[in-house]
Image (cartoon, helix red, strand yellow):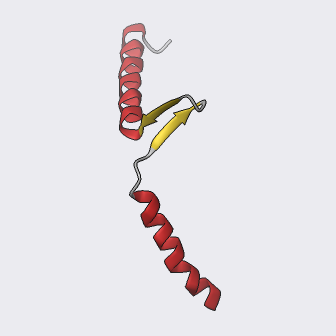
Amino acid sequence: MVQRVNRVPSIRATCIYRSQRPVILTAWKIWSIQMSTFCQILQASWSFFTLLKTVHGDT
């Protein structure tokens, strides 16, 4: 039980450290994009998908 209590500050410090760095996604170790750019791409893709679905119907 003593070891578990001692690990909590270490885990907390690791979480704080990782949360202060920006999230960057890498595809095939070539392209790096930020999370905000990825979200914009997803939003645009979803809008385009719903537009196509509306124009061409559910079939």
Observer-nearest of 4 and 42: 4
Rendered view: 7 above or below 36: below
- Determine the residue positioned at 50% across, 67% down: 14
Across and down, in percent, residue 17 comes to 44, 63
- Determine the residue positioned at 38% across, 20% down: 50
Kindly give the residue lying farthest to the bottom in the view shown.
2
Quadrant of the rendered structure where residue 27 is?
Answer: top right
Across and down, in percent, residue 33 comes to 44, 33
- Determine the residue positioned at 41% across, 40% down: 35
Across and down, in percent, residue 22 comes to 40, 48
Kindly give the residue lying farthest to the top in the view shown.
56
Rendered view: 6 above or below 45: below
Q: How many marks?
A: 0
Report whether 10 appears left or right of 17: right
Rendered view: 33 above or below 3: above
Q: Quadrant of the N terminus?
A: bottom right
Observer-nearest of 34 and 45: 34
Across and down, in percent, residue 57 comes to 42, 11
